[in-house]
Image (cartoon, grey):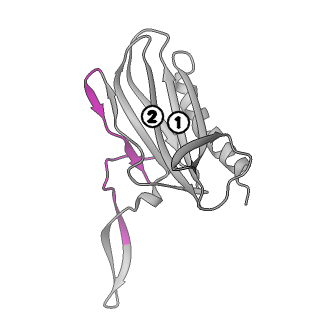
Amino acid sequence: MPVKSNLFRILGIGLLALAIGLAQSLGLDLRYYLVKSLEGKEVYEENPLQVKPGDVLEWRLAAENPQGPLRQVILIIPIPKETYYLEGTAKPLSLNGATIRPEFSFDGGKTYGLPPLKKRVRVVESGKEVEKEVEVKPEEYTHARWVVPEFPKGAKLQVSLRTAVR
């Protein structure tokens, strides 16, 4: 089941929104790779022509700051709806001695938080409708972001995560 065109469309929208705010001052490059195992080692196929359910994709967002120092830079990787996030694959970023943990969204990028994320749902218990707080599964995440407090001139960063094709 090829899903490449949908991946590009969804990623194009997310990357466009990110790039609009930073286009003048930050170089961004978002790529994805099909992760395969060959003789016990991982190999990466860049921009695969086709993917199928169960395939693992690694998304890498590289950022470079050729201008002056920037503050509160937000690096976002949208998670295409045709895939789901693989828990634990978005690693913290280390910069200038600080550790920047990835935050996640399950509502299309409107809100973000550190796991475990919680949401309120309505359920029927003993014939009455009640509201409960439940934990959001990592498979429900729609975006991951890293908020970089200070991005020095000349610095290069890369963040990544993995998803599996639905």
Q: Mark 2 and mark 1: span between their CA atoms?
A: 6 Å
Answer above or below: position of 21 versus 102: above
Task: Tell whether 155 sits left or right of 23.
Answer: left
Q: Looking at the image, which residue sits at the far bottom? A: 127
Residue 158, horizontal then vertical, whole percent: 46, 29
Amino acid bearing label 1:
Arg
Residue 17, horizontal then vertical, whole percent: 57, 34
Q: Looking at the image, which residue sits at the far left? A: 97
Residue 9 sits in quarter: top right
Task: Tell whether 106 sits left or right of 44.
Answer: left
> Which structural element holds mark 2?
strand
The residue carrying mark 1 is 60
Is residue 102 something one can see in this rendering?
yes
The residue carrying mark 2 is 159
Q: Are marks 2 and 1 in contact (CB under 8 Å)?
A: yes
Amino acid bearing label 2:
Val
Answer above or below: position of 155 versus 73: above
